[in-house]
Image: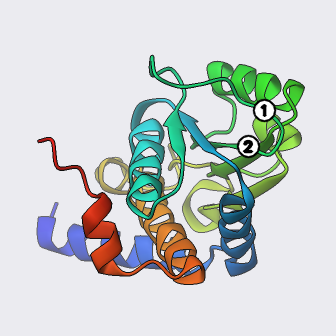
Amino acid sequence: MNYTEELVKLADHQKALLTNVNMDEILAMSEEIIKANRIYVAGWGRAGNNIKMLSMDCSQIGLRTHIVGDNSTPSIHEGDILIIGSGSGRTASMQLFAKQAKEHGAKVGLICGAYDSPIEKMADLTVHICDESHTNGDYRATKGVLTEAERLVHADAFYPVMQTVCDFIRAVVAEKIGVTPEMMHYNHNNIE
């Protein structure tokens, strides 16, 4: 495998995924974050790491945010939003969290790599990051679509693209509520 060539292909692949994200979905998610009393996030694995960074970013723009499962996370209620990050939209624990959030009157948002997942069926809004060209709509490359070498490089393109989408959501929210880089710096963690 030519590593430089594959790196460039990966960058092109990620650009294509980003280009296909529906901006209306991003703007809708941003508006719900702004309207929410509190933002809760949940995810597992790499999607969980990405969604936790969205929570951190929300705290730095001055919003009240919590990570599900952390000991200091308060109960969720009407007026709050739970945002789930899930490549497949099928993770069992995330389905349970979505169901519980809905039972307590909260909205559920989803950032997902698939359409019509079980979590999406419970969600109030979804940002789709779907890889139609390589995976027939699923969130990772499937055997037979790409060579084995290409699958190693491209199989999980969803995750870095998800992080970029989360970064962009943060930027949209910050711009809409008038947060400056100086304000974000003030809210940045200073117990390090």
Task: State whether residue 122 is above or below residue 75.
Answer: below
Residue 119 location, quadrant = top right
Asked which secondary structure carries label 2, the reply is loop
Q: Residue at x 42, y 31 (%)?
A: 45
Task: Give whichever of 128, 80 is nearer the camera.
Answer: 80
Task: State whether residue 88 is above or below residue 8.
Answer: above
- CA neighbours of label 1 inside 10 A, class few (<14), some (14 to 19), many (20+): some
Task: State whether residue 42 is above or below residue 176.
Answer: above
Q: Which residue matches tag 2?
A: 80
Q: Which residue matches tag 1?
A: 77
Where residue 63 sits: x, y (%)? 52, 56
Res 102 seen here:
yes
Where residue 90 sits: x, y (%)? 69, 31
> What number is the disc on residue 161?
none
Q: Mark 2 and mark 1: span between their CA atoms?
A: 6 Å
Question: Amino acid type of disc 2?
Answer: Asp
Asked which secondary structure carries label 1, the reply is loop
Q: Give the colouring mode of the picture.
A: rainbow
Q: Is residue 21 found left or right of 66 in the rendered image?
A: right
Instruction: Give the quarter of the figure containing the C terminus.
Output: top left
- CA neighbours of label 2 inside 10 A, class few (<14), some (14 to 19), many (20+): many
Q: Are marks 2 and 1 in contact (CB under 8 Å)?
A: yes
Where residue 29 sits: x, y (%)? 69, 63
Question: Amino acid type of disc 1?
Answer: His
